Image (cartoon, rainbow, N blue to C red):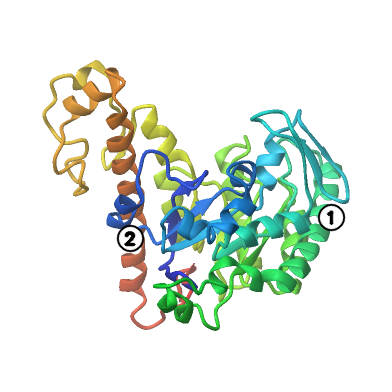
Amino acid sequence: MTLPHGPVETPVFMPVGTQGTVKAIPQHLLEELDVRILLGNTYHLYLRPGHEAIRRMGGLHRFMSWDRAILTDSGGFQVFSLSELRKVTEDGVSFRSHIDGSSHFFSPEHSMDVQIALGSDIAMAFDECTEYPADRTRAQKSLEMTLRWAKRSQEHFEKHKSRVPWTLDRAPGLEHRARAFEGQSPNLFGIVQGGMFPDLRRECAERLVEMDFPGYAIGGLSVGEPRELTREMIASTLPLLPKDKPRYVMGVGYPEEIVEYARMGVDMMDCVLPTRAARHGLLFTSEGRLNIKNRQFAEDQGPPDPACGCMVCRRYSRAYLRHLFTAQEPLSAVLNTLHNLAFYLETMRRVREEIEAAGSVRATEISGTHVAL
């Protein structure tokens, strides 16, 4: 994908930077890990420091000192998670802040305004995420709402997308950036919903494709359903989405799952799992999951993962990482997170190499795997 803030090779795993930060990791280390795109959270950034404040400071890229690509979600999933604090109507969603209880309202148009103010390379249409389990009537109703909101999101986004901060950026010393963005604009992806009903997923996908978004996401997964059902929904929905446009599965998954989904033809994935697990002492390795707080590692001088060449595994021992965790040292979260992100990113790099090696003749479709060009 060629985005305003640089190219992104797919399939790609996107670290989650919920509040303008990938927890415990400064931006220069993300660059060393070769992160090309990360995810920001519209709901959280809207609440603090506020999207208008970020707009006045030049957009999220400048605010967080990140010159590479950013995808922002619509805020729909976070509002969905506030089940006791929200009310959904045709116009949008009324909700109370989880921070201070203050009242707020998100419509498709307002979600677009917030994401435009943030200045992301890829914005997401405002959708209603269906809970699990949900019966067919509930899933159908939610699907119809999502499609109406997708159209409203698209119309408002196309009308106002030229207001992203970086297209207006002519600050001294940044003229080169303005030239780089010339002729480029942010993208809006549609989101497929439909609960756990393949025929409803089909209906949603087909109607979204008619709206001609530049990319499509499969949402409403990893909300408590069995893993087998997640895979079934992805497998039944992917063939319905254009192969020449990015296909994004939101909120997945474990390392073995992201490899499987990439081989199925998914181009983009994100998940808080590598960063959240790291803060709880769980490391992902070539030998499986490793709980670093276990007593057996107290004097283990080996690296966290003997097969990993990341900056953590090259320098630190399991014994030291266990000590940091049990002593509740902040460095524990930093080093564990660095390793887990490196493991996820290296996993995706190997998948891309596998695709490239298999694709010397056909680069855009290999054994069912799609490469967004």
Mark 1 neighbour density, 10 Å: few (under 14) some (14–19) many (20 or more):
some
Q: Secondary structure at mark 1?
A: helix
Q: Amino acid at mark 1?
A: Glu
Q: Amino acid at mark 2?
A: Arg
- Residue 13: image location, x then y, percent: 43, 55
Query: Looking at this view, is 107 or 197 the one in front?
Result: 107
Q: Tag count in the figure?
A: 2
Residue occupying the point 40% across, 68% down? 9
Residue beneath disc 2: 349
Vertical relation: 235 (above or below) 272: below
Q: Secondary structure at mark 2?
A: helix
Residue occupying the point 45% across, 39% down? 273
Vertical relation: 328 (above or below) 244: above
Query: Looking at this view, is 269 or 71 the one in front?
Result: 71
Residue beneath disc 1: 144
Residue occupying the point 49% across, 63% down? 267
